[in-house]
Amino acid sequence: MHYTTHPERGDSLLTLAEFARFIGILQTPINQRQRHGDLKMVSIKVAINGFGTIGKRVADAIDAQEDMEVSGVTKTGPSFGCELAIKKGFPLYCTFDDEDMIEQFSKQGYPCSGGLSALLAISDVVVDCAPGKLGAENIEKYQSAGIKYIFQGGEKHELTGLSYSSSANHMENMNAKGSRVVSCNTTGLSRTLVPLFEHCGSLKVECTMIRRAADPGDSGKGPINAIKPVLKVPSHHGPDVMTVKPEIEINSLAVAVPTTIMHVHSIVADLPADHGLTTESILQMWADTPRVIIMNGAEDRIPTTAEVMEMARDIGRKWGDLHEIFIWEDGVKLIGDRLYYFQAIHQESDVIPENVDCIRALMGVEEDWRKTVAKTDASISRYYSSLS
Ligand code: NAD
């Protein structure tokens, strides 16, 4: 048996996926292998179409899992992002099938394995991480390749007719052909509102999204010296929660502010009269919820998003990511039946583990949302701790 050292994890054992690849049964996508009935343990081959802010993070999160692997990532043309793909050992493909565009990569010194069609042909599922609103064009390519697909929150729910948030509707997504992981804001709302709803049986919510103006890597967005209200009322963020948990009544307003590091939500939730909760029991409920962190702004000296991001960098995930939703304990108060709270969202990363869970739902490999969440998070944690 030939054992090798994994380039990122640095361990000395082959994963199941690597072992299976070694003995040669994983050269074809799962749908074909299942037809041949020759598979018990599978490694899901995941294509990443669009290797930008979200795509590079999803690729890492997939690479961390034992039951899936990155079959390839696409770039539209040679650029600095290709270096990262190559360094990580992710096969690089061109977003398009045009031979001239594919050739541009090798001219700039980046080995390119072909166009998108070639990548889709060797994959079980594609995670579309293209800029929003390209979905209508891309979905046709995925459907004609006959593989499963996941879009991001920049696309509308109507594109797939199905959306995803791990705690809200994992089961509904089991074995579906395609889905859409809701946006970073909607993921954040869903993380803290779903457990409240599950306890109360009904919930009415009004919230304001205080949104970062741009991601740290963006140079073309703003404002840089203004507060910009979203003059479409309600904003799409709150109502989007109802695509994954329709029973929650929710509306939202949104403003963009000159910061790049997080969104903050200011939330007012009306609970039904018989809720039986206290501020303390609500905090305990969230403490028991995966991917939620609660700290005390005053006592822990973490009063703003700047300190939250500093704490995230201490955790040691790449890019200083914070997959968890952050709640300030001292910013939570239940007054009568009305709950007030603030939460902060790391916009570039809270949706990343949800994409992994969504793959397991679409591929029908794990029914229990808590089990997939635990598996995803433990693998990501191992992956990055082995790097530090
Ligand atoms: P990005 O601009 O950082 O990355 C997009 C990548 O896709 C780039 O590398 C771009 O070159 C490539 N691309 C361009 N045209 C393409 C095409 N036709 N097909 C495939 N790839 C193409 O964008 P992003 O921030 O990663 O956003 C991707 C999606 O994730 C969007 O739907 C966005 O709304 C959503 N999202 C973004 C954030 C965030 O904070 N950045 C958070 C949650 C969800």
Image: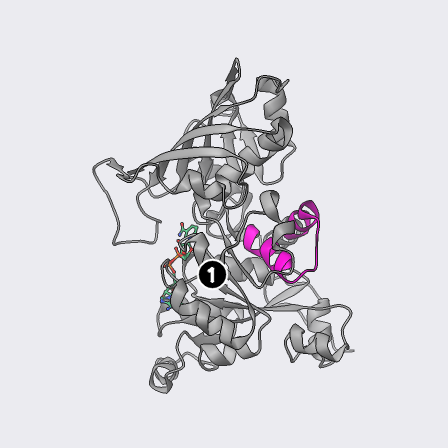
Q: Nearer the viewer, residue 185 or 375?
A: 185
Q: Is mark 1 on a helix, strand or loop?
A: helix
Instruction: Judge whether residue 154 can be spotted in this image.
Output: yes
Nearest the viewer among 114 and 37 is 37
State the image coordinates of residue 53 (x, y, percent, origin top left): 41, 57
Q: Does the magenta stretch include residue 137?
A: no
Depicted 62 relative to depicted 22: above or below: above
Report the residue at 41% width, 53% height from top.
Answer: 156
**Residue at x 60%, y 46% (from the top left corner):** 169
Task: Classify the position of the N terminus by image quarter.
Answer: bottom right
Ligand 1 visible in quadrant: bottom left
Kindly report the secondary structure that dominates the magenta region of the rendered protein.
helix
Q: Residue at x 55, y 55 (%)?
A: 355
* Location of residue 112 by image quarter: bottom left
- In the picture as drawn, the residue positioned furthest to the top comes out as 336
Q: Is mark 1 within 8 Å of ligand 1?
A: no
* Residue 370 is a magenta residue: yes
Numbered range of the magenta stretch: 354-376
Q: Tell me if residue 263 comes above or below residue 74 in the rendering.
A: above
Q: Which residue is rendered at x = 62% and y = 51% of the image?
A: 172
Q: How many labels does the image show?
A: 1
Q: In this view, does 328 lie to the left or right of 66?
A: left
Residue 160 placement (x, y as % from top left): 49, 59
Placement of 47 over or under 285, stated as above or below:
below
The amino acid marked with disc number 1 is Lys
Disc 1 marks which residue? 56
Q: Going by the image, does 213 lie left or right of 174? A: left
Viewer can see residue 14: no
Label 1 CA crowd tier, 10 Å (few <14, some 14–19, many 20+): some
- Residue 214 percent location from the top left of the image: 32, 47
